Amino acid sequence: MEVKKRGKTSKMWVRKPSMSKEEAVRFIEDYGGQHFLNDRVKSIRVKTRLNDFYIYATVWNYYGKCWYEDPVARLQWRGDDTYQLAYFRHTGKWHNIFELVGTLKECLDWVNENAYDVFWE
């Protein structure tokens, strides 16, 4: 019996989120524009990779007297329109906060409220 080698299989989601990627990015940017911007935060940018959303903020550095882009949060789609919220550690790695799983708006509210004092330092 001859065994056939399988080529690389492409991973794909069985179910899709109710909101398309473009709609979700627009929603995150609109929400961020209304809630995250202040004298220290100049702008919000969203990057996507697969069904993950990475939120970056352009923030003011008082020590260097300059603007720089800082990773704020990562939202990973978990299915059934729920997202896992993670923050960017000083070690350069993302860390999931397991208690914070909710809808896109709930996760953005947690970022805005600075849950666990890890998003806006």
Image (cartoon, rainbow, N blue to C red):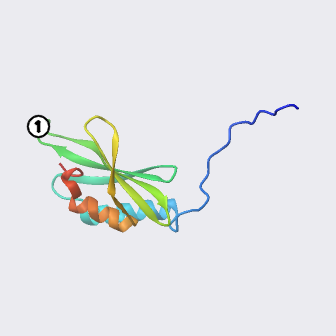
Above-or-below relation of 105 to 86? below
Number of residue marks: 1
The x and y percentages for residue 59 are 22, 47
- Report the side of 112 relative to 50 (left or right): left
The x and y percentages for residue 72 are 29, 49
The x and y percentages for residue 105 are 36, 67
Outermost residue to the right: 1
Above-or-below relation of 85 to 31? above
> Which residue sits at x=33%, y=62%?
107
The x and y percentages for residue 57 are 28, 50
Q: In the rendered image, which quarter is residue 15 located in?
A: bottom right
> Which residue sits at x=43%, y=59%?
25
Q: In the rendered image, which quarter is residue 64 located in?
A: top left
- Report the side of 31 relative to 9 (left or right): left
Residue type marked 1: Tyr
Give the residue at mark 1.
63
> Which residue sits at x=19%, y=53%?
117
Say which element carries label 1. Answer: loop
Outermost residue to the left: 63
Pick the residue in front: 29 or 15: 15
> Which residue sits at x=21%, y=58%?
114
